Every structure is written in C-alpha cells, then in structure tokens.
Image (spheres, rainbow, N blue to C red):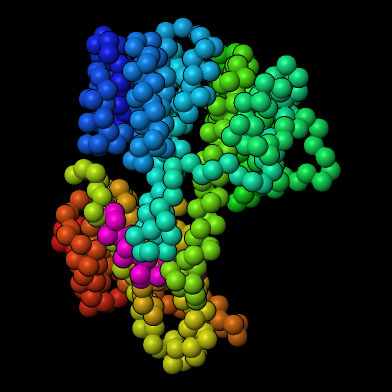
C-alpha cells in the first residue's frame, strides 16, 4: 500500500538513490536535506513515514526525531533510522528516541518495502482512530488524546512459551528491563499458567525454529482464528535473513516479524510499538463506549446517528489533503416503508430497520462509515474510493436489501427494496450539507425512475 515518504538525509547521493528505489515501488517520495526543510515538509503535508539518516550529524538528527515525536501532527508518524552497518548501538538510540525501526541502506528490496508497508498500515489505522477522536473532541465530548497513552496500570502479558529456542534467560532479562520502563506491570512468561487465557495475553512471540516453520505458522493461524474479533498480537521470529518465512508470517497475520539474530533492544522496540498501537485502539474503543454511546449512536440500530455522521463528513471535506483524495456520500432509503409499518406494525418496521443496518455494515469496508440519519434513511460515507468501486458498493447494498427477505418477530418473511442516491467522488464540495443535498437529489430521481435502483448525481457519474 504505497504512501507518502519523506527522506531526511544531508547526503545528496543517498537522497537520490532512495527516491529512485522507492519510486519504483510507487511510493510518493519527498526529500529534505536539513532540519528546517524537514519541518516545512511535515507542516505542508504530513508524510505517512519518515526515513532519517543515522549516519551524518547525529546530534541534529536526534533533535529532528525529538521534534517529530513531540509534534502533535507527526507524533505517530513512523520514523525509521537508516544506517550503513549492522550496528547494535543504533537500536539503543532508536529505543530511547521512540524510533519505530532501523534499516540498512543496502537492505534488500523486499525487506525495505515490507517494513515500510507494515509501518504505513499501522499509521493508517492510527489515523482512523485519531480522526475518530478528533470528531469526538470537536463535538465537545472528550479532550483530544495525546499520541501515545501513558503506561497502562493493568498487567501486560507477553507469552514467550512458543519461542523457547530464541528466548533464553540471556534475552529475557535485558528485554524485561527495557520494556518495564514503558510497561511497569509487564510480565514475560515462558510457561503460561492455567489461569492465563488467550484473552489475557497481550502478545505472543512465536519462533519458527522452536516449533518448525509449518507448525509455527499453523499455531499463529489458530491463535488468530480462536481470538475472534480480539485476535491476539503476534511477533514472529524468523531465521536469519529468511525473507520467505517472514513474508509468509505477514501474509498469515503476524503483527510484525523479527530475525533470530535481533538484539534485545530491537525486540523491545518492536514489542513496544505493537503494545502501544494496541493500547491506543483499546483506549479509543473505551472512550467511544463511555462518552458517546447515548449521544452519537442510534439506539435502534447501534449505527452512528446524523449528528456524528455530519461532523465526520465535515472533517473529511475540510481536511482533504490533495486533489486526488475523494469523499463520497450515499443516501439509502427503504422504498414504501410506510406500507410495511401499516401492514405489519411498527415493531416489525423496527426489525426491518435493524436488519437493514446489519446488512449495510457487513457490505462496506471497515474504514467506511454507516449512519442512520432518518426513520428509514441511511448515510454511507466512503473515503478514497474510485467511481468503479463506488458503483460496485452501491449496487451490492441495493441487492442485499432487495434480494433477501426480512424476518419479523412474528416469523413473517417481508420483502423490501431500497433506492440509493450517490454524490461525491472527485468533485469539490463546500460543506457536508451541499454533498448530502446532491445525494438526496439523486435519491429522488431514483425514486421517480421506479425505485429499487442506484442513481448518481451529475458530478459523481
């Protein structure tokens, strides 16, 4: 998933080499040769990841990292140190400075690309959480959060029992010392107790040498499958430089991987990043549950209500980073819903609305927003979806309503259909109200054309 990368390196040949190498992989690369240029680039358009030279003028580069991590805008933007040699000292510095990763300039194409993509995916998830929290803050329900939450008071369990060959006492002791600075109630366990459940374990470390590669991958798949929605975090230990196994581990759901020769500092940094990101997501869920359930959620369906949806949409329109980013709104209305209420009663009508909400949620991307904005009217907000993708989603939603009957509490099977108006894509909109009004007009035309259909406003089509 290519993203925007900022390369900060005072050596011009390094900058040119990295830009050429990363552009081939479709990353959007910008360059900075000094601290002031880096600050300008970050303020102008916050990158998805920043590569910082560890080699030249380290004092200045450390100052740069401090600034990035202290700046609210870039605090959770991943930072990678670039180094010429496999030097353990760089991991000491990276752990202290909260740098996310260390790579050598001569790292293989696959290793560099996979590390960049892994960190960018993490940032995308954090961006979604940050945007959600900012919407909450804008509405006056909670203060905007800091980039990383304070050390949790609850116990943190790291299970090493599946990595016995790589994690003897010589590794566990320094690892515990490094991690307990950030997680005072950390517990590293090599022999889980019977009371320890999969739900209480925060991260598993699995070693392909301890179990054998196939058994280790199978164990990871089983842990994730049995964890359900709360699938555990997994750090997969790979034999030295075996990129094939590392690639398979990522494909099967590992949160991160580390080579068997890694230092305690590197392992601690990777574990800390996984736990921090997990903690941020967990805290975001608690915040929403505590402050917003009654105010921003529709009590009948559990979807967001109109108030939250309009605030969220305004934020997306306001913060479009470039002309390529898109915001699309779909307004979906159940056809002739009054007839259902009049024929079967309002309780049955409520059941149809609840089941409609469930179908909509199941058939959009996890990053998309579905809200109930009226009696039988729903709003779906899509970000950065192509017109072809929007058409596919809209038709799938319409089909999900019209092709399957709804089940009333009485056991009756009820047929219904929906009309959808779509507006957005690459058009420019001054406000959420203008975007919704355009989608509403498209919806009215869909109703006039016979219902049970999708209609696009002129700009979106």
Residues 101 and 244: in front is 101
Q: Horizontally, is 398 left or right of 297 in the view?
A: left
Q: Residue at x 23, y 54 (%)?
A: 318
Residue positioned most to the bottom: 342
Residue 11 lies in quadrant? top left
Of helix, strand and loop, which mostly describes the magenta segment?
helix
Q: Position of residue 144 (x, y in %)?
A: 40, 53
Q: Is residue 316 above or below residue 237?
A: below
Residues 93 and 215: in front is 93
Q: Residue at x 23, y 25 (%)?
A: 36
Q: Horizontally, is 301 left or right of 427 in the view?
A: right
Question: Was residue 302 drawn as part of the magenta stretch in this picture?
Answer: yes
Q: Position of residue 199 (x, y in %)?
A: 70, 48
Q: Which residues are magenta?
A: 301-316
Residue positioned most to the top: 85
Q: Is residue 219 above or below residue 284?
A: above
Count of picture labels: 0
Q: Position of residue 223 (x, y in %)?
A: 68, 40
Quadrant showing the C terminus: bottom left
In this view of the protein, can residue 129 be seen by the observer? no
Question: Was residue 53 drawn as part of the magenta stretch in this picture?
Answer: no
Q: Position of residue 113 (x, y in %)?
A: 41, 23
Residues 254 and 177: in front is 177
Residue 43 lies in quadrant? top left
Q: Residue at x 24, y 63 (%)?
A: 432
């Amino acid at each position: 998933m290519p993203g925007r990368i900022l390369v900060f390196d005072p050596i011009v040949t390094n900058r040119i080499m990295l830009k050429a190498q990363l552009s081939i992989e479709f990353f959007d690369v910008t360059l900075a040769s000094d601290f002031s240029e880096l600050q300008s680039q970050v303020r102008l358009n916050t990158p998805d990841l920043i590569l910082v030279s560890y080699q030249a003028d380290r004092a200045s580069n450390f100052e740069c990292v401090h600034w990035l991590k202290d700046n609210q805008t870039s605090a959770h933007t991943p930072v990678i140190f670039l180094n010429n040699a496999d030097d353990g000292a760089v991991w000491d510095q990276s752990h202290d400075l909260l740098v996310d990763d260390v790579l050598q300039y001569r790292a293989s194409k696959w290793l560099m690309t996979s590390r960049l993509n892994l960190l960018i995916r993490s940032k995308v998830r954090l961006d979604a959480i940050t945007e959600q929290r900012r919407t909450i803050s804008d509405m006056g329900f909670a203060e905007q959060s800091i980039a990383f939450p304070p050390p949790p008071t609850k116990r943190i369990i790291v299970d090493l029992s599946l990595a016995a060959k790589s994690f003897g006492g010589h590794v566990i002791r320094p690892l515990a010392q490094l991690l307990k600075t950030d997680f005072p109630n950390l517990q590293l366990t090599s022999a889980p107790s019977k009371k320890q459940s999969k739900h209480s374990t925060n991260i598993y470390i699995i070693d392909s040498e301890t179990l054998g590669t196939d058994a280790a991958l199978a164990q990871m798949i089983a842990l994730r499958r049995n964890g359900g929605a709360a699938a555990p975090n997994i750090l997969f230990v790979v034999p030295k430089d075996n990129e094939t196994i590392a690639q398979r581990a990522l494909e099967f759901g590992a949160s991160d991987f580390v080579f068997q020769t890694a230092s305690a500092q590197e392992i601690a940094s990777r574990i800390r990043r996984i736990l921090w990101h997990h903690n941020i997501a967990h805290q975001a869920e608690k915040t929403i549950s505590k402050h917003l359930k009654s105010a921003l959620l529709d009590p009948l369906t559990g979807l967001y209500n109109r108030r939250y949806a309009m605030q969220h949409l305004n934020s997306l329109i306001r913060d479009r980073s470039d002309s390529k980013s898109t915001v699309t709104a779909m307004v979906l209305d159940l056809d002739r819903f009054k007839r259902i209420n009049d024929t079967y009663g309002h309780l049955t009508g409520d059941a149809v609305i609840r089941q409609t909400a469930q179908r909509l949620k199941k058939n959009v991307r996890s990053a998309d927003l579905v809200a109930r904005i009226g009696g039988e009217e729903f709003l779906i907000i899509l970000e950065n979806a192509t017109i072809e993708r929007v058409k596919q989603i809209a038709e799938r939603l319409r089909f999900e309503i019209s092709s399957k009957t709804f089940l009333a509490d009485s056991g009756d099977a009820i047929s219904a259909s929906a009309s959808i108006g779509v507006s957005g894509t690459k058009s420019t909109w001054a406000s959420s109200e203008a975007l919704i009004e355009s989608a509403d007009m498209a919806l009215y035309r869909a109703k006039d054309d016979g219902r049970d259909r999708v209609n696009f406003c002129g700009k979106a089509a």
